[in-house]
Image (spheres, grey):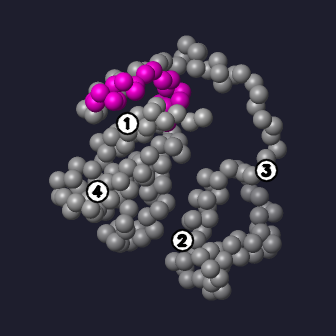
Amino acid sequence: EFFLTYRLNQDVLENLFSVIRQRGGYNRNPTARTFRTSFRINCVKNLIAPPVHGNCEPDDSSVLETCASSPGISIINAEDTIVQNNVMTDDVSSASDTHSVASSPDSDDGTPTLESCAEVYLAGYIGKRIVDKYKCDICEGTFLKPVGSLLDGKDELMLVYKTFESKTPTITSLRAPTPLLISICKTVLNVFSKKFPST
């Protein structure tokens, strides 16, 4: 709706090209492929990185503390989720207790969070390492989606931005995990966070 004409100033464009030329070492004349990759990495980096200096003050209010007790938010037992994933163990059942849906990375409104995207990326990395180490076709079919399958899930955003070779998807080292592997990794992360709480 708004077009910021000051962004078309020569100084801003020169700064952008300067950043792209310096990406990965000095490159005076980047190719179109290098430019595209550097521009994509720079955009993702600037979107994910929080600002260092902002014009806001620390929020000392207690509004967020009262959100957990509001009637619109339901409480889910973590043990039920673990039983549904068929990964029930004694350590898991003793570590599970109730948690709020508000603190869950999977929000009901369908928008992915950075945490859920990172969990999917981690699950894909773990699945790829398992397949590379054991060379098992059954494991590959169980834990990873087929090579060249579309990355259409909202939580697969980090995989989409890291897959630079869109023309030849067979040479990329990244693989998309199946929902089973994602649920296993989320369960392991939940157990790990309960066993080793942050200070």
Whether residue 140 is in magenta: the answer is no
Label 3 or label 4, whichever comes before in sequence order: 3
Compute the Cα span from label 4 to label 1: 18 Å
Q: Identify residue type, mark 4.
A: Ile
Q: Is residue 109 visible?
A: no
**In this figure, which residue is indicated by the disc labeled 4?**
130
**In this figure, which residue is indicated by the disc labeled 2?**
37
- Disc number for residue 187: 1
Q: Are marks 1 and 3 in contact (CB under 8 Å)?
A: no
Compute the Cα span from label 1 to label 2: 34 Å
Q: Is residue 182 visible?
A: yes
**In this figure, which residue is indicated by the disc labeled 3?**
53
Whether residue 91 is in magenta: the answer is yes
Rendered residue at 45%/21% (across/down): 98
Q: Residues within 10 Å of mark 4 (few under 14, many from 20)?
A: some
Residue 30 image offset from top left, x and y in percent: 59, 82
Name the secondary structure under disc 4. Answer: helix
Rendered residue at 42%/51% (across/down): 122
